[in-house]
Amino acid sequence: MSIFLGKLLEAELYKFSEYEVKAAFIFNFSKFVSWPEGHFSKRKRTINLCILGTGFPLNTFDYFEGETAQNYTFTKKRVKDLSDIDGCDMLFICSSERFRIDQIIKTVKNMPILTIGDTEGFAEKGVIINLYMEENKVRFEINIDAARQARLSISSHLLKLARIIQNK
Amino acid sequence: MFKFLSEKSLRAFIFSLSLSLIYITTFFQISYGAEHNKDALTKLTKLNIEELMNIEVDTVYSASKFVQKTTQAPSYVSIITSTDIKRFGYRTLADILNSLSGFYISYDRNYQYLGIRGFSSPGDYNSKILLLIDGHRINDNIYNTAYIGNEFILDIDLIDRIEVIRGPSSSIYGSNAFFGVINIITKNGSKIDGFELLGEAGSFDTYKQRITFGKEINKKFDLILSASFYKSHGQNLYFKEFDNPATNYGRAEGVDGEKYNSFFGAIKYNDFTIQGGFKTRDKIIPTAPWNSVFNTHMTNTNDTTGFLNFKFKRDIDTDTTFMSRVFYNYYYYDGNYIINKPPVVRTKDLSWGKSWGAETQLNKRIMEKHLITAGIEYQDNFLQKQRNYDELPYTEFLNDRRNSYQWGAFLQDEFSIKDNLILNAGLRYDYFKLFFGNASPRLGLIYNPNKTTILKLLYGMAYRTPNVYELYYNDGNITQKANPDLHSERIHTYEFVIEQFFKNYRFVVSGFYYRIDNLITQVIDPSDGLMVFKNLDDIEAKGIEFEAIAKWKQNIEAKLNYTYQEAKNKDTGRLLVNSPRHLIKSNFYVPIINKKFSSGLEFLYSGKRKTLGGRYAGGALLTNLNLLSEDIIKGLNVSATIYNLMDKKYGYPGAGEHIQQVIEQDGRSFRLKLTYTF
């Protein structure tokens, strides 16, 4: 705990915004997920985060661009439509997409894409990881059935910290 | 800046600074060579999930009635948490608020009064500050009092955090949000997670017990119940104004006693919350106000307050929140004054206030860049009753029974013009049965030239309607008379705030200019010598506040703030009564052996204040020291506090009902507090 506080000291006075912290979570998730074997080919050295929809400030991900997770470089791009999700390893679905979330999930549920949201009810709809706020702190829930269907395995470490959701 | 400072306050300032330095260097060595990263944000990339889960997003709800970053709020905001309360051994809400930049308190040995930005007029019962518990208005409907001393309804150990919004917020709250809004957010049951027992003992035979049960039964259901009991024998005091053989040579002995019982409970189920609080407090008054007989325990007051709040709040989606609530407020005041008229009689001074009301609010984000907040509120004051009579022989002076209602509607838009530029604009209209309509606008422009600098330009207008006490109270025209012709007071405020983050420091500078029209003030009518409330013309206040906050390695924290303020009657050019020019506060938290043993040291300086008689209550530097041991054995916290460590003699200006120009305050005192959670 004290090491943690030491690390945070400087950061602590500058209070982060909800989005900045959420972006850090999203980046971190990439470290705890194993994609199916053969997913990353030899020439693909990046983990691509795609952002679908509007509302989540894209520039908050700038700080994570170029960082490495599992020996891959983290990159991000905004996708206009579902037809553009080729090459996405992670897909952040903004709240603006809530009215067509069922359609999005239907399209991506069998693909090895880690879907992430920050909208109430998204996990129940089949989004794999959903962020929510609790007393000023960011928390997350994981739909383990959705992860299984996408053939992603999520480390038990992450599962321990999450609220677990199962498909009904 | 130092030109303003009198020699005395300068001395106090330097003294407190050097003491703090000694204090810091004695207890630890700051490891300076720490590697400083260029940007706090890049640190985020280095944190792991557990660390991220511990980060609190610094948000405030009360400034705009939706959750926003404090740096984006249209106000200079301060947040105090339960951790601060623990670290510095605060006993009352007054203690807590007194540590903040620009705030000061006074105590007449019955109630505590809050001063903000140079205003704390004697006879005004904190009616110009709006006090909320979880968004629910606590100011009563007779005096509009925001209770902040032991008379405050909630045990301060049940406070999770306090949001302090400086400047007027009538644009979303209506009346009383004149100088500021204080919103108390209570703890959830999950924070207690079991039983908590508290035992306290302090100077002047003061004892307190509390038992609290709190539990999150499941994700949907949370419960907290608490009861507190307090009793204090109080001090023996000396008042030189009464120093003659007939009045015990000015010695008030055994007449400073106080006791209270308070209860609080909240149940949360899904989107529903039911919350209620109750407190009954008795205080013996040692100051012999209103020409009462000196040195008798029969002159005392009882204040009983209660509320119920039934709330429904649902996040319909991330862009829409709906809230609706119904509430009930109860207030009862029972004052006993032994007065030699002659004969010696017991004068009963009583009031009853009851109200209910309802409120509905909607937050909605539209077109990406606009966050609209709209609400309507209705309050029915179905009982506002004041009585004043002598018991034997029975003579009635006042029996005034009223009722009134008010409704208000507001609309606010937070418009993100650019990524780093926000316009927060709001307008509220209120209608009062007695005072027609009042419109209150507020404008805030918030600009971030870069990630670590925040500039705010703020304009606000607020009002306060006179309360039934100011309008109708009289005690048979013996000391005080009524003035039903009073009208609302109004304030215009202009303020700028600059906030700068630099490494592990945060700096704030705020400059303000307030203009008040028709300020409601208690004065003595020269024609009959009676106290009466009048609308005074043209009051002007200006000032500047500086604040620096630092967090160092090993979790050491320091805070220093300085306020220069000048509140004047524009016609006479005279400084207002009970309005210190200088305020300096600083506090330090130092973990000596981690959390096992830590200390909180606090310096509070308030400059001299003018009294009603044109004399001065001298400035005083107070030092409080708290030693804290958390989890000394599992679940047990021990805190030992010395208040007024240097035993400084000081006093606050009295009000119109006091013979004393200055009312003396406590010297050095102690408190030992044990909290056990299981």
Image (tube, coloured by chain):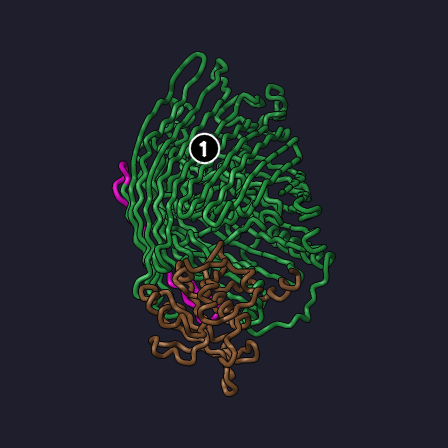
Chain colours: A brown, B green
Q: Does the segment drawn in magenta span residue B228? A: no
Up-down relation of residue B41 to residue B629 (above or below): below
Q: Chain of mark 1?
A: B
Of all residues, the one furthest to the top in this rendering is B393
Q: Tell which of A95 and B429 is nearer to you.
A: A95
Q: Is residue A18 visible?
A: no
**B236 relative to A147 in the view: left or right:** right
Q: How many marks?
A: 1
Query: Residue shown at 48%/13% (left/top)?
Result: B343
Question: Where residue B295 appears, x then y in whole percent?
Answer: 58, 23
Q: Tell which of A67 and A116 is nearer to you.
A: A116
Up-down relation of residue B6 to residue B354 (above or below): below
Q: Tell which of B367 and B547 is nearer to you.
A: B367
Q: Tell which of A24 and A104 is nearer to you.
A: A104
Q: Does the segment drawn in magenta span residue B444? A: yes
Question: Where residue A155 appears, x then y in whole percent?
Answer: 56, 67
Of all residues, the one furthest to the right in this rendering is B26
Amino acid carrying label 1: it is Thr
Q: Is residue B146 visible?
A: yes
**A103 relative to A11 in the view: left or right:** left
- Local SS, label 1: strand
Q: Magenta: predominant secondary structure element?
A: strand
> What residue sits right under mark 1 in the picture?
B305
Quarter of the image for the C terminus of chain B: give it: top right
Question: Where residue B472 appears, x then y in whole percent?
Answer: 34, 29
Up-down relation of residue B144 to residue B442 (above or below): above
* Residues in magenta, as a range: B432-456
Query: Residue shown at 38%/77% (left/top)?
Result: A85
